[in-house]
Amino acid sequence: MKMKKSQVILLLIAALVLGFAGAYSGVKFAQPEIGVTPNASVKESAEGNTKQGAGNLDKVAQAFALIKGNYLEGVDDKQLVEGAIEGMLATLGDPHSSYMDVETMSQFNEQIESSFEGIGAEVSMVNGVVTIVAPIKESPAEKAGLRPNDQVLTVDGESLEGLNLNEAVAKIRGEKGSEVVLEIQRKEASEPFAITITRDEIPVETVYNDIKTIDGKQTGILEVTNFSTNTAKEFIEQLNMLEGKGIEGLVIDVRGNPGGLLDVVEEMLAQFVPKDMPYIQIENQDGEKAPRYSDLAEKKPYPISVLINEGSASASEILAVAMKELGYDVVGQTSYGKGTVQQAIPLGDGSTIKLTMNKWLSPKGEWVNGKGVEPTIEVKQPEYFYTNPIVIEEPLSFDHTGETIANMQLMLSGIGYDTGRTDGYFNEKTEEAVKNFQADHALGSTGIVDEETAGLIEAKLIEQIRSGDDDQQLETALNEIYK
């Protein structure tokens, strides 16, 4: 499927709204729904709790004065105050509640409104480790081969251990054209490996369309890469355009979409979920549930499928589970599992606290947090989609064995070079495949895999994946939609 360039998720920058699990670095925070301004009840609650905790706040003031007056070196007031706020939030043990200073908040606003610079991935803090939720489509992170659930251990050789998410994101993001080296631990790899990424500008475009002819029927495809300010408008315009062309079925693709704004996905679901069924329920601190409904009279007259994967989080999951409970197929792999709602509450000086305040539940009351949305039709991509970068400590050649060679064999097979086996033994057939690859790409046909050959194998594999020519999940969704 040929989709346009640039998905939108705000590169590693800071925090997102609705459906983000953590942060963008040029990076983005992955947190579902975040209201942008506090409502009256939030303010009243804050004031009431401040009065109740006056005694404890006196203790905080005492500590502040003690440090200011006695610490060996000079201390900045702002540093102490912001450290206290971050400390309070850290005690919650919630990766989605965080403090955003003036600079971070400014970057966050840029993420949901225009474009930003960075690597193009959304990150979250999982068990104290900075973790990729999803790379943005066509972003430097995607082109470099980053995947959902990759753990970022170091940035340019500096460990991220002990840093909060905002601090880690600040190290990852950077100006267009600059390079950053990330040390990555991947679940499938026994050892960490380094990935060098050139940062770029990430435009905020979030909806792309296509039409495929399946069994003589025109099937529309809408790929949604993020739920930001203008996404619902773009989505509805493109949906109307496809319907105007007479589509007889629709596939909504939210794979790798880390989420965004709650009201945006609500507006989109209102195009599909009839008024006799809620499209979402919001549960507050007291366990009270508030279902939300559309004004739609009836379902669309054509079949619909939704595509998800492990990088689909928050708002993507709100959409997927609602469509699933409405009776539509969900195709792919189990999603991320982000079921909480954050609100961004300004503190008056341009800084903000992003605080988890609610749960979101499916129309039938299911909470997907930590579990994800299970597809009705489970489909994995071809095995080579899940390979790891080739780590070359010494050149690989005939009669060598090991995990790295097995990984390379899968890569070569994926791009059309038959190695005869993928068990990690560098046999004559593998050597022949390497020689053929080298000959086809103007490398010396030695049959030995050095850093240059390994790098080109990886680059060609990424090209193959991004071309969409072997997208088994999409193919299944299209083939099953009319059954």
Image (spheres, grey):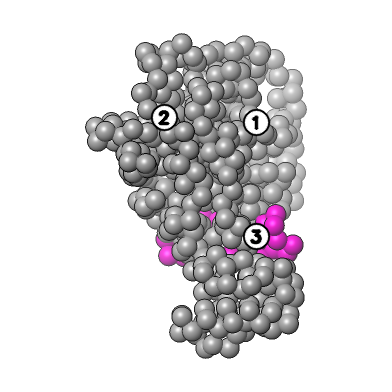
**Residue drawn at 69 percent across, 49 percent down:** 129
Q: Along the line of sight, which residue is nearer the eye, 341 or 163?
A: 341
Residue 184 circle label: 3
Q: Distance between the residues labelled 1 and 2?
A: 28 Å
The percent position of residue 298, horizontal first and vertical second, equals 38, 16
Q: Which of marks 3 and 1 is nearer the N terminus?
A: 3
The percent position of residue 67, horizontal first and vertical second, equals 73, 41
**Residue drawn at 42 percent across, 16 percent down:** 274
Q: Distance between the residues labelled 3 and 1?
A: 25 Å
Q: Which residue is denoted by mark 1 in the rendering?
A: 369
The answer to if 324 sits in the magenta stretch is: no
| Marks 3, 1: nearer the viewer | 1
Q: Is residue 124 above or below residue 327?
A: below
Secondary structure of the residue carrying tag 1 is loop
Residue 303 circle label: 2
**Label 2 is placed on what type of residue?**
Pro
Secondary structure of the residue carrying tag 2 is loop
Q: Along the line of sight, which residue is nearer the eye, 268 or 110?
A: 268
**Residue drawn at 39 percent across, 55 percent down:** 201
Badge 3: residue crowd in 10 Å (few <14, some 14–19, many ≥20): many
Q: Residue furthest left?
A: 244
Q: How far apart are marks 2 and 3 (CA)?
A: 41 Å
**Label 3 is placed on what type of residue?**
Ile
